[in-house]
Amino acid sequence: MKKVLFPVLILFFSCQLFSQSLPLWIKNTKFKGDFRLREEYKDETGKIERYRTRIRFRLGFITKVNNTLKFGAGFATGSGDPRSTNITLGDSDSKKDFNLDYAFAEYVPFSGLTVWGGKYKGIKNILFRPTDLLWDSDITPEGFGFLYSKDLSENSRFFFNSSYMILAEFKESGADPFVYFVQPGIVFQRGALKIKAAFSFFNTVHCKGSSFDYSSHSNSVDSEGKLLYDYSVLNPSFEVSWKTNFRSIEYLRVFGEYAVNSNVDDEDTGYILGFRFGKKIEKNGDFELTYSYRYLEKDAWLDIFPDSDSFGGKTDLKGSEVEIKVGIAKNVYLSIDYYDMKRILDEDKTCKLIQFDLNFKF
């Protein structure tokens, strides 16, 4: 017993001494990551059926530099596409790219206000977006902005988000394109009911006459492939949740968004409606089911932003998505995501996509 106890005590006191010698900001650093293994099938009009195996690995950290300042950074697999961190396996077992996904500073001068700058940790962190109709969840925005919230009463809270996002830097022109947005909203909660709603305004500047990397090539363009319009989009959105008393179904949510671009006279609107029910995926047996129907016209929004799995991230589409998640162990779950989409202006063009995922979080 003594032979076992002595080295354990030495290790314990060594760790204590080492931890006390570390700078405080290192002690305050938190890491997180995830890994996903995916089997995917895609059937798109005019293209051969495609099967592929893909992986995604992400690792990030955030550290508290002092009482008001935080710094965060993350890395992810991917090709550089802002709407995807997937890597397709193959290519003679070649090494895979691992890129900077985000790096940012966050300043909290007082409770309720957060100011950020850099390449932020995800679009969902600066914007209430109950769906991916307009914004793919993999986008890590570049620029600066702030988030503000204030309790109005015991049951309600006001929030206001605003950001300036850099889209490109053209050496030959000083008119670099960017987008900014403002989003006031409110959260109301009483008992089992929770309502979150917002009214967003997105405005692109100097996008007309430009072309962008990673465009899905579905917006209106001229003979040189340059955009015909800028985009000034009004976007009301909501999410209504009810907590239930069922063991396997913890909540039921209904959500939706509407968008209209005031800079064009036709093909300028979009919407999405859906529902979700189940339980937060934490352990074996937990499940969640989500259904949504989306409709996004050709020039309702800039085509570098929408969900890349929905007909390749195009605008000018409509269709349904169904996703099922099932927990199989703590921090491990299976998911099946099915998209059935078609173009609005040419309904003969369709795209069916199904993804089988095994997800690990740590």
Image: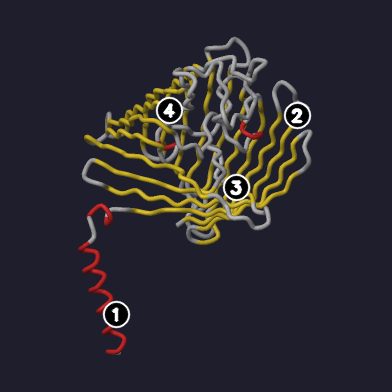
In space, the residues marked 2 and 4 are separated at their CA atoms by 33 Å
Q: In the displayed structure, would residue 92 be above or below residue 47?
A: below
In space, the residues marked 3 and 4 are separated at their CA atoms by 33 Å
Residue shown at the point (63%, 48%) measured from the top left: 336
CA neighbours of label 3 inside 10 A, class few (<14), some (14 to 19), many (20+): some
In space, the residues marked 2 and 1 are separated at their CA atoms by 66 Å
The residue mark sitting in front, 4 or 1, is 4
Q: Which residue is mark 1?
A: 8
Q: Which residue is mark 3?
A: 324
Q: Amino acid at mark 2?
A: Lys
Q: Amino acid at mark 1?
A: Val
| Residue 171 relative to residue 354: left or right | left
Q: In the displayed structure, would residue 158 be above or below residue 208?
A: below
Q: Position of residue 49 (x, y in %)?
A: 77, 43
CA neighbours of label 4 inside 10 A, class few (<14), some (14 to 19), many (20+): some
Q: Amino acid at mark 3?
A: Ile
Q: In the displayed structure, would residue 263 be above or below residue 47?
A: above
Dot 3 or dot 4: first in sequence order is: 4
Pointer 3 and pointer 4: residues touching (CB < 8 Å)?
A: no
In space, the residues marked 3 and 2 are separated at their CA atoms by 26 Å
The residue mark sitting in front, 3 or 4, is 4
Q: Secondary structure at mark 3?
A: strand
Dot 4 or dot 1: first in sequence order is: 1
CA neighbours of label 2 inside 10 A, class few (<14), some (14 to 19), many (20+): some
Dot 2 or dot 1: first in sequence order is: 1
The residue mark sitting in front, 3 or 1, is 1
Q: Which residue is mark 2?
A: 349
